Image (spheres, helix red, strand yellow):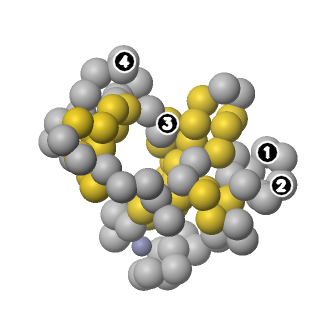
């Protein structure tokens, strides 16, 4: 596994997270084509197989990362640490 913040899928940066424990999992830039950079089959933190991806778009303001939703709007309810992943 090569951990990166996101991988490019058709021009869209994609990152993975665990839908069970909400851990940010980043992406694997060595994943086979078609896997969209899925970093693992299971969550390394809780073991769940319920992994999900999201478009990695957003903005960093005052050191906080604000993901954008599918409409390009800030999802202020879920700010994240603005430091680069990994
Ligand atoms: Zn998990």
Give me the C-alpha separation between circle 3 and circle 1: 16 Å
- Tell me whether circle 1 and circle 2 mark residues in contact (CB < 8 Å): yes
Give me the C-alpha separation between circle 4 and circle 3: 11 Å
In the drawing, does residue 77 fall left or right of residue 25? Answer: left
Give me the C-alpha separation between circle 2 and circle 4: 29 Å
Q: Which mark is residue 71?
A: 4
Q: Secondary structure at mark 3?
A: strand
Q: Work out which quarter of the rendered image holds the N terminus and state it.
A: bottom right
The residue tagged 2 is 32
Is residue 39 visible to the viewer in this orientation of the structure? Answer: no
Give x and y (percent) for residue 40. 64, 69
- Residue at (53% x, 58% y) in the render: 26
Number of other residues with Cα within 10 Å of mark 4, as a class: few under 14, some 14 to 19, many 20 or more: few
Give x and y (percent) for residue 76. 17, 36
The residue tagged 3 is 55
Q: Secondary structure at mark 4?
A: loop
- Tell me whether circle 2 and circle 4 mark residues in contact (CB < 8 Å): no
Q: Earlier in the sequence, mark 4 or mark 1?
A: 1
Number of other residues with Cα within 10 Å of mark 2, as a class: few under 14, some 14 to 19, many 20 or more: few
- Tell me whether circle 2 and circle 3 mark residues in contact (CB < 8 Å): no
Q: Is residue 36 above or below residue 30?
A: above
Residue that sits furthest to the front in the current view: 62
Q: Which mark is residue 34?
A: 1
Number of other residues with Cα within 10 Å of mark 1, as a class: few under 14, some 14 to 19, many 20 or more: few
Question: Which quarter of the picture shows residue 38?
Answer: bottom right
Question: Which quarter of the picture shows residue 66?
Answer: top left
Q: Secondary structure at mark 1?
A: loop
């Amino acid at each position: 596994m090569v951990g990166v913040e996101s991988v490019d899928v058709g021009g869209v940066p994609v990152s993975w997270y665990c839908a069970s424990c909400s851990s940010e999992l980043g992406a694997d830039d060595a994943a086979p084509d078609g896997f969209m950079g899925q970093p693992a089959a299971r969550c390394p933190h809780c073991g769940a197989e319920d992994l999900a991806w999201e478009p990695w778009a957003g903005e960093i303001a005052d050191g906080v990362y604000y993901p954008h939703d599918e409409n390009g709007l800030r999802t202020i309810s879920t700010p994240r640490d603005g430091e680069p992943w990994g």
